[in-house]
Amino acid sequence: MLAGERTHQTMKRKRTTISIDGTSNHAGVVRPEFLSFTLDWWADTEPGWDGDASILRIDLSNPRLIHAAAALAPSFLRIGGWESDRVVYLLEDDATPWQRSYCAENPDFCLTMERWQEVLTFAERI
């Protein structure tokens, strides 16, 4: 393991509250194209992570999530994570037999058109 690297088994969960009053002087300004947040891929079987933390499982209609994400606007929504290299985007009806077979065997790593539409709706709300 590299210095500073942590595995999910070693991370401790603790509740943290961050408050921004908006009246303080800014320490610096970040250009809008650098502001973003990420929704990661996580398999339900991955130890140490909540089953609903993955982009495939998270409730994108949750008002608290929408409110928190909207507070970051303008921003970019990034879908990724280290597991994203395994993802197949099954967004068209003319998917190849290999894509359909892979998605049947690996549903945690298959983005369907239905879920993609839910992601787009979430992005429009924020």
Image (cartoon, rainbow, N blue to C red):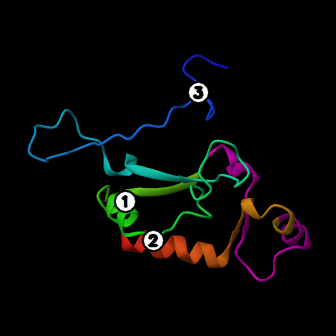
Image-based side of 101 in relation to 4, left or right: right
Residue named by callout 1: 69
Q: Amino acid at mark 1?
A: Ala
Q: Residue at x 29, y 58 (%)?
A: 71
Q: CA distance from mark 3 to mark 2?
A: 30 Å
Q: Earlier in the sequence, mark 1 or mark 3?
A: 3
Give residue 115's position: percent from left, percent from top: 61, 73
Question: What is the residue that sits farthest to the top in this orientation?
Answer: 3
Judged from the image, the secondary structure of the residue bearing numbered disc 1 is helix
Q: Work out whether residue 39 or residue 53 is closer to the camera in this orientation and state it.
A: 53
Q: Residue at x 19, y 45 (%)?
A: 20
Asked whether disc 3 touches disc 2, contact meaning CB atoms under 8 Å apart, the reply is no
Q: Earlier in the sequence, mark 1 or mark 2?
A: 1
Q: Work out whether residue 19 or residue 94 is closer to the camera in this orientation and state it.
A: 19
Q: Is residue 4 above or below residue 69?
A: above
Q: Residue at x 77, y 83 (%)?
A: 93
Q: Amino acid at mark 3?
A: Arg
Q: Work out whether residue 86 or residue 66 is closer to the camera in this orientation and state it.
A: 66
Q: Which mark is residue 38?
A: none
Judged from the image, the secondary structure of the residue bearing numbered disc 2 is helix
Q: Is residue 23 above or below residue 114?
A: above
Q: Residue at x 54, y 20 (%)?
A: 4
Residue named by callout 3: 6
Q: Residues within 10 Å of mark 1 (few under 14, many from 20)?
A: some
Q: Which mark is residue 122?
A: 2
- Total marks shown come to 3
